[in-house]
C-alpha cells in the first residue's frame, strides 16, 4: 500500500527493516531494542547521536538543548504556557487553523492570550497576515508552521525580538530553514520523524531562565534539560526509530528532500487544478507542500474515489474528520513515484466517472 496518511504516516522501507531487526537483536547486544535499559550506555548512545543529528539538520549550536519528551503536541500546548506564561502576563498566538486554536485554548488556563492575527473568517483557506510585533508586551509568540488539516504552510520562520515558539510537527526537516529564529520549536512523531510516542523539543538555553512558575519536574523544561530527557522511563523504541529517520534524512540530504518536496507538491497541485473532478481549497500562494487538501465534485464522487484508491493499493487520502473531502500528505517517506501513481488514478477515475 502507498500510505498518504497524515499521521501516523509512512516510514521508509529501510527504516522499517532496521527497526524490525533491532526488535530481535539491537546492535548485536543480544537484547531487543524493546528490552535495553533506558539508563544504560546503549540508550545513552542513541540519545546523544539523535541530538547531534537534530542540531546538524537544524543548524543549531551549543546554545540549544534537544529533548525527547512524551505526550504529543497537546502536552507542549500546556507545558509552554505552564513554564513561560505568568498569570498576569500575555502570550501572542498566530491563528492559522485547528492546532494553533487548540494551543491558544490550553494557554488560556495559565495566563492571558492574545490573537495576533487570524484567518478564521476565511475558514483557514489562507494564512493570516504575519503580525507587526512592534510595541507588543508579550511573553512569547507561538505559530504553527504547517497546517495539516486545512493545508496551508508558512514558507519560512520569521524573525522576532519576542521569543518565537513554533509547532513544526508536520513539516520539520522538509526543507532548509533558519531554525535559530525560534527560541523553542517542537515536532511530534509520526510525520517526518520517527514513530508515535515521542516529541522532539529544541529549546534555546536562555529560555530556561524565563520559567515563571514552579511546576512538577515532569512538566519543567529546566528539569527535563537537566535530566537529559530521562527524568522518567523514556520511550526507547520510538526515539530509536526517530534516530533511524534522522540518519535517513542526513544520508538523503535536506536539499534533495526539498527538491523532491517541491516536485511532489507541484505535480499534485497541477493535476488538481487540471482535473475536472477536483478543486483546490487553499489560496495558491499559501498552499502546503506537506498536506495537500482538496475537494471532489460532490460527496458521492468523493466516496467512490476513496474506494477506487483503496482497490488500487493507495490509502490515507481521506480528509480530516472535521472537514472531510481529501488530504494527501507528502512527508519525506513519500516518493515522487508514489505521487505519480496517485495522479494516474485521478486521471483514470476522471475518464471513467459518470
Image (cartoon, rainbow, N blue to C red):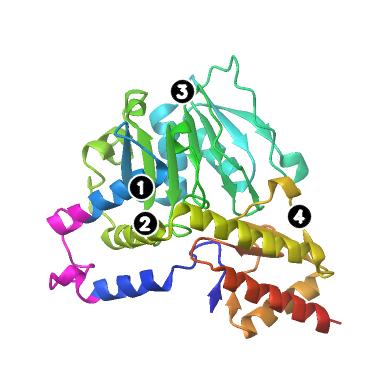
Q: CA distance from mark 3 to mark 4?
A: 39 Å
Q: Position of residue 312 (x, y in %)?
A: 63, 84
Of callouts 2 and 3, the N-terminal one: 3
Q: Which mark is residue 54?
A: 1
Label 4's element? Answer: loop
Question: Residue 246 bears which disc, if any?
Answer: 2
Above or below 115: residue 153: below
Give, as a single range, the part of the protein colored magenta.
24-45
Mark 3 lies on residue: 87
Question: Is 316 left or right of 109, judged from the image as shown?
Answer: right
Closer to the chain start, of discs 1 and 3, is 1
Residue at x-position 79% and y-position 70%: 299
Residue 237 inside the magenta-drawn segment: no
Mark 1–mark 2 distance (CA, rounded to whole Å): 7 Å
> Label 4 crowding class (10 Å Cα cut-off): few <14, some 14-19, many 20+?
some
Say above or below: 221 vs 332.
Answer: above
Pointer 3 and pointer 4: residues touching (CB < 8 Å)?
Answer: no
Residue 53 in the image: state x and y as whole percent.
Answer: 33, 50
Q: Compare marks 4 and 2 and give the one earlier in the sequence.
A: 2
In this orientation, which residue lies closer to the viewer: 332 or 324? 332
- Residue nearest the viewer, comparing 75 with 1: 1
The answer to the question of whether label 4 and label 2 lie on touching residues, with beta carbons closer than 8 A, is no
SS at mark 3 in the image: loop
Q: CA distance from mark 1 to mark 3?
A: 33 Å
Along the polypeptide, which appears first: circle 1 or circle 4?
1
Nearest to N terminus: mark 1 or mark 2 = 1
Q: Are marks 1 and 2 in contact (CB under 8 Å)?
A: yes
Q: Which mark is residue 281?
A: 4
Residue 278 percent across, percent down from the top left? 79, 66
Amino acid at each position: 500500500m502507498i500510505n498518504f496518511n497524515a499521521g501516523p504516516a509512512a516510514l521508509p522501507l529501510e527504516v522499517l527493516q532496521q527497526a524490525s531487526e533491532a526488535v530481535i537483536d539491537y546492535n548485536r547486544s543480544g537484547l531487543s531494542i524493546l528490552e535495553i535499559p533506558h539508563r544504560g550506555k546503549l540508550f545513552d548512545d542513541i540519545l546523544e547521536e539523535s541530538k547531534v543529528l537534530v542540531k546538524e539538520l537544524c543548524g543549531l549550536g551549543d546554545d540549544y538543548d534537544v529533548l525527547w519528551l512524551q505526550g504529543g503536541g497537546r502536552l507542549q500546548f500546556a507545558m509552554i504556557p505552564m513554564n513561560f506564561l505568568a498569570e498576569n502576563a500575555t502570550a501572542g498566538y498566530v491563528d492559522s487553523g485547528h492546532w494553533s486554536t487548540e494551543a491558544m485554548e490550553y494557554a488560556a488556563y495559565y495566563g492571558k492570550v492574545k490573537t495576533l492575527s487570524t484567518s478564521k473568517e476565511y475558514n483557514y483557506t489562507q494564512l493570516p497576515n504575519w503580525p507587526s510585533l512592534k510595541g507588543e508586551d508579550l511573553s512569547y509568540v507561538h505559530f504553527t508552521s504547517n497546517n495539516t488539516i486545512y493545508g496551508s504552510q508558512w514558507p519560512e520562520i520569521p524573525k522576532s525580538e519576542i521569543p518565537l515558539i513554533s509547532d513544526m510537527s508536520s513539516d520539520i526537516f522538509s526543507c532548509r530553514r533558519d531554525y535559530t529564529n525560534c527560541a523553542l520549536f517542537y515536532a511530534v512523531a509520526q510525520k517526518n520523524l520517527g514513530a508515535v510516542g515521542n516529541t522532539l523539543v529544541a529549546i534555546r538555553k536562555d529560555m530556561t531562565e524565563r520559567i515563571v512558575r514552579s511546576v512538577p519536574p515532569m512538566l519543567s523544561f529546566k528539569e527535563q534539560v537537566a535530566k537529559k530527557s530521562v527524568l522518567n522511563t523514556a520511550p526507547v523504541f520510538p526515539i530509536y526509530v526517530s534516530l533511524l529517520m534522522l540518519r535517513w534524512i542526513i544520508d538523503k540530504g535536506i536539499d534533495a528532500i526539498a527538491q523532491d518536496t517541491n516536485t511532489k507538491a507541484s505535480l499534485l497541485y497541477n493535476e488538481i487544478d487540471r482535473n475536472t473532478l477536483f478543486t483546490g481549497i487553499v489560496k495558491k500562494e499559501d498552499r502546503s507542500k506537506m498536506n495537500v487538501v482538496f475537494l471532489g465534485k460532490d460527496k458521492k464522487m468523493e466516496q467512490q474515489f476513496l474506494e477506487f484508491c483503496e482497490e488500487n493499493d493507495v490509502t490515507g487520502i481521506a480528509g480530516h474528520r472535521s472537514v472531510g473531502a481529501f488530504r494527501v500528505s507528502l512527508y519525506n517517506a513519500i516518493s515522487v513515484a508514489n505521487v505519480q501513481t496517485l495522479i494516474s488514478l485521478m486521471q483514470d477515475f476522471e475518464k471513467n466517472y459518470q
